[in-house]
Image: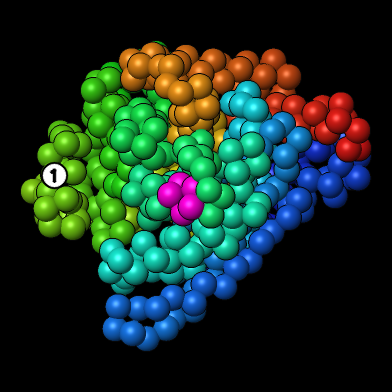
Amino acid sequence: MSVEHDPLVEARKQLKQSIEILGLGDEIYQVLAVPDRVLQVKIPLKMDDGSVKVFIGWRSQHNGALGPYKGGVRYHPDVTMNEVIALSMWMTWKNSLAGLPYGGGKGGIRVDPHRLSKSELERLSRAYFEAISDIVGVDQDIPAPDVYTDPQVMTWYFDQFSRVKRGQYFGVVTGKPLEVGGLYTRIIATGYGTAIAAREVAKKLFGSVEGRTVAVQGYGNAGYYAAKFLHEMGAIIVAVSDSRGGIYNSKGLNPDEVKAIKNKTGTVLNYPAEKKITNEELLELDVDILVPAAIENVITEENADRIKAKAVVEAANGPTTPEAEEILTKAGIVVVPDILANAGGVIMSHIEWVNNRMGGWITEEEAQRRLEYKMVTNFNKVWDYWESKLDKEKYNMRAAAYAIAVDRVVAAMRLRGWI
């Protein structure tokens, strides 16, 4: 798309609206508009062929009033410092809204991980985590997986930190494999939580999610599990896509079969369907529920007036620009915002973190039950605030979610004497 958006500009616009809704002063906005700290690190990496390449990484810690900083680390060739700062701000609100004892953090390395061998990826990951090891810790800052990072990368992080600090610090990262303190439910959590959010908004709009049509843009972890669980709930998944394009079938797709084809061939495009579509066409399909589960800023003022879904449930971080959301709101389209819809990952991260600190205390069944309870409770809290305290013609669900989240952070800062 031709319009370029700075995620930090978008994040600050959303913050400013919340400050206005809550009747807070500009000084509060100034305090929250910038992160507590941002660390940039240089990573000279010796490649397998003996050459040396330099990569740049960041860790942003936005606000720690509620507790240790918490948020993922992404590997992507287009990562910028502003993007990492914006994502750390969004994590502050996400953690606050979920009622977790965490502040917001985020990390990133500007790299295309697909161009690295496994050994190069391991060396890069260990070097990055060692470079930021002074500002992370079990009670300080707890990273997790994000775009193009996974449980294996988290294990390298955990192991490198344990080597540097000379101990066993299982709780320094979440999203780990089962063998080193992880939980299976953490792997499915973001997508499962998104499916629950979609189910709950479908209850409000249609009475039930059963029989409702769904399109999912992005078929990584979040997109796949959102599609899988919505399919199991009775929804009809008519379209999915990955970075190469998408597929459409009016009678519905089987998410597991699509995933198997993607795993085997590298793309969903090789799945036999009625037709192939672009990512842009998927966004504009006439469906009941649209789940953007890829990257930020895919719904903009350029295409917002062509969105036909009745509800947009944000599995990705920041997929809808503020300008686009104004258009969607006026059109009566309900957007379940990212800080609510995709909070399943960090909710489960909290459960994993507590589990690590207590030496193992929870079953997978109990973890999944707790996740569902938290997602449903948070959804209803935001919906009720939106209906009872805001003008629904003027404000949307994101405004309600942000108001709740910002208010809790500000209250904590006041109690701690920070403002």
Magenta region, residue range: 157-163
251 vs 367: above or below: below
Name the residue: 44% across, 81% down: 53
Main secondary structure found in the magenta portion: helix
Q: Quick check: can you spot residue 19?
A: yes
Asked if residue 77 is among those painted magenta in the image, a careful observer would answer: no
- Label 1 Cα neighbours within 10 Å, binned few <14 / some 14-19 / many ≥20: some
Name the residue: 41% across, 17% down: 362
Q: At label 1, which amino acid type do we have?
A: Ala
Name the residue: 16% across, 50% down: 263
Q: Quadrant of residue 178?
A: top left
47 vs 373: above or below: below
Name the residue: 20% across, 36% down: 255
Q: Is residue 376 left or right of residue 39?
A: left
In depth, the one of 179 and 145 nearer the eye is 179
Q: Is residue 412 left or right of residue 236?
A: right
